[in-house]
Image: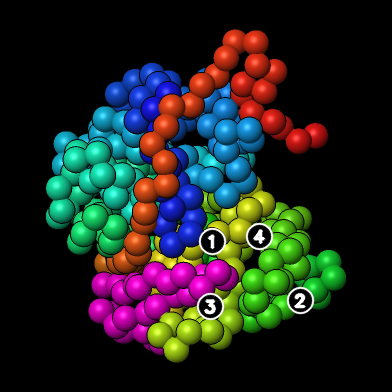
Amino acid sequence: MRVIDSHTEGEPTRVILSGGPDLGSGPLSERQRIFARQFDSFRRAVTLEPRGSDALVGALLCEPHREDCDAGVIFFNNTGYLGMCGHASIGLAVTLHYLERAPLGTLRLDTPVGPVSVQLHDANTATITNVPSYRYRSDVNVVVEGLGSVQGDIAWGGNWFFLVKQSPVPLESNNIKALSDAAGKVRRALTQHGITGADGAEIDHVEFFGPAHSEHADSRNFVLCPGGAYDRSPCGTGTSAKLACLAADGLLQPEQRWVQESIIGSHFEASYQWAGAGRITPSITGRAYICSDANLVCQPLDPFAEGIVAA
């Protein structure tokens, strides 16, 4: 299969251009369900070792279902499927431009959770206009093993997040293991206590916040993704969820700039507009760079052709 690898502010994306499964021509949400039921071995082969890594997000390029979209995409990682992925949307747009399939300007992506617009400013810089985002519940307390009572907001930014304003440990790169362990405990506690997003949806992302290290940023974050890896970028859907909380609290006005810093020091610039019914439309700007242009090979006798699954 032909793939292009890129990173967006440090977080890797692998776009599958050809050799992927035939999922039909239905809505992207339906095709994602077919992918998960019938072709999950493909997901594992692309994202797991020896071809992938726990931080890698795959993006299967598809024909769009919506007539107003230029391309369709299904996002997935080492553990399952993502409704939306901000950094990977930027990576996909930059990849299509690299391949001379997309000019500078606006690109409309059809995703399983709705259409997303990407404005390509130059060969490496793009702004996504994300799906409508909102805060579902505020100041939710959950008792977490080893951490005691942890308070956070539940918000949707294309994925479900539990956003904790005060990180349990300092947001330093040498604390990544401790931050990952703490976020994992929070996520397990949410499940154990039956704390969910709307309609019982699983909260599969945990986000900690603290003061920015750079004078050019407003906040620093740490995001634990569903597969147990931390987000190297400031997280597009996580930043969207953060904007929804700031807007709900009246702490950030429409069109006001917010710079989110990641645990490795990379930045997303963000703002929002009101979308009505307590929702916002976030805009996230970041940079992506091409890392490789390759073919992945799965040989018939390879015992790890479908990836290495840890026991």
Q: Nearer the viewer, mark 3 or mark 2?
A: 3
**Residue 294 x, y percent position in the rendering:** 42, 32
Q: Which residue is mark 1?
A: 232
Residue 220 image label: 3
Looking at the rendered structure, the secondary structure element under dot 2 is strand
Q: Is residue 177 left or right of residue 8?
A: right
Q: Nearer the viewer, residue 308 or 249?
A: 308
The single residue placed furthest to the top in the displayed view is 300
| Identity of the residue drawn at 29% across and 83% down | 256
Q: Earlier in the sequence, mark 2 or mark 1?
A: 2
x, y percentage for residue 140? 63, 73
Disc number placed over residue 84 in the picture, else none: none
Identity of the residue furthest to the right in this view: 146
User: Viewer-nearest of labels 4 and 1?
Assistant: 1
Quadrant location of the C terminus? top right
Q: Which residue is mark 4?
A: 195
What amino acid does circle 2 point to? Answer: Ser
User: Regarding mark 4 in the picture, which secondary structure is present there?
Assistant: loop
Kind of residue indicated by mark 3: Arg
In terms of sequence position, does the residue under pointer 3 or pointer 2 come before the other? 2
Instruction: Rate crowding at label 4 as few (under 14), some (14 to 19) or many (20 or more) other CA atoms within 10 Å.
Output: some
Asked whether residue 269 is in view, the answer is yes
- Residue occupied by mark 2: 149
Q: Residue at x 62, y 21 (%)?
A: 305
Give the distance between the C-alpha atoms of the residues marked 3 and 2, in whole angstroms. 22 Å
* Numbered disc total: 4
Image: 6 above or below 150? above
The Cα–Cα distance between marks 4 and 3, rounded to whole angstroms, is: 25 Å
Q: Earlier in the sequence, mark 4 or mark 3?
A: 4
Q: Are marks 4 and 1 in contact (CB under 8 Å)?
A: no
In magenta, the rendered stretch is 247-273
Relative to 83, 311 lies left or right: right
